[in-house]
Image (cartoon, helix red, strand yellow):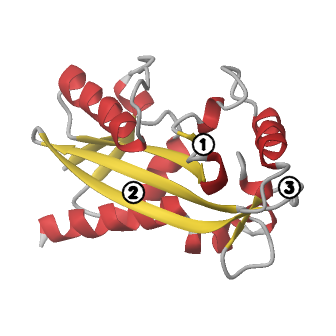
Amino acid sequence: MRLIFATQNQNKSKEINSLVGEPFEVLSLSDIKCNDDIEETGLTLKENATIKARHIYLTYHYNCFADDTGLIVEALNGEPGVHSARYAGEQKNDNENIALLLKNMADKPNRKARFETVICLMLDGIAYYFTGVLDGKIINEPLGDKGFGYDPIFMPDGYDITLAQMTLVQKNRISHRAKAFEELARFLKQLNS
């Protein structure tokens, strides 16, 4: 069965292909010549994932899935949340997002935060959801040069290094995104058994 992953990133498609295996073939948006700018107007990660998946399903008539990820900081009432990528503005600049978050956290003793990924799978018009969460805390200054986004200031519970100090293998073992995709892969394998 062919599934479209609502991403332009072919590496992400390859990664999920290796997780789900036969008889599923995962393609990216570029594989179906989709360059649509899908506006993420949802108020939650689940709504944004649904908007993207539903658009691909209704427009291109493929079974598909989409994900949305956010950093939820307890002391900031869940910010940046659905606005994580654009926290400091439409330019989606990781360094500016981190600087703004650290500024907003300057006087906050509570450093608890979590990364959350929600996947919406549209299969024959029915939506299924899968979630992955990684709990941790926001540290006072960026550490590490691997990863992307807020990785340099996020230290997972039980670790004394940030996500940006971990190898990709270490990060993928514990990450919110990996957990959500593993749930999706399990569901697809059960469909096939």
Q: What residue type is labelled 3?
A: Asp
- Image position, residue 30 (x, y; %): 44, 28
Which residue is nearer to you in this view: 37 or 40?
40
Q: Name the residue under label 3.
A: 145
In the rendered structure, find residue 17 and report the number of the disc placed on it.
2
User: Residue under circle 1?
Assistant: 79
- For residue 39, above or below residue 10: above
Q: Which residue is drawn at 39% across and 51% down?
A: 118
Residue plotted at (39% across, 34% down): 48
Q: Which residue is at 58% across, 60% downward?
A: 114
| Horizontal relation, residue 22 to residue 174: left or right | left
Drawn side of residue 51 relative to residue 73, left or right:
left
- Left or right, residue 156 beside residue 14: right
What percent of the width, then of the height, locates residue 122? 20, 42
Secondary structure, mark 2, is: helix
Q: Is residue 62 visible?
A: yes
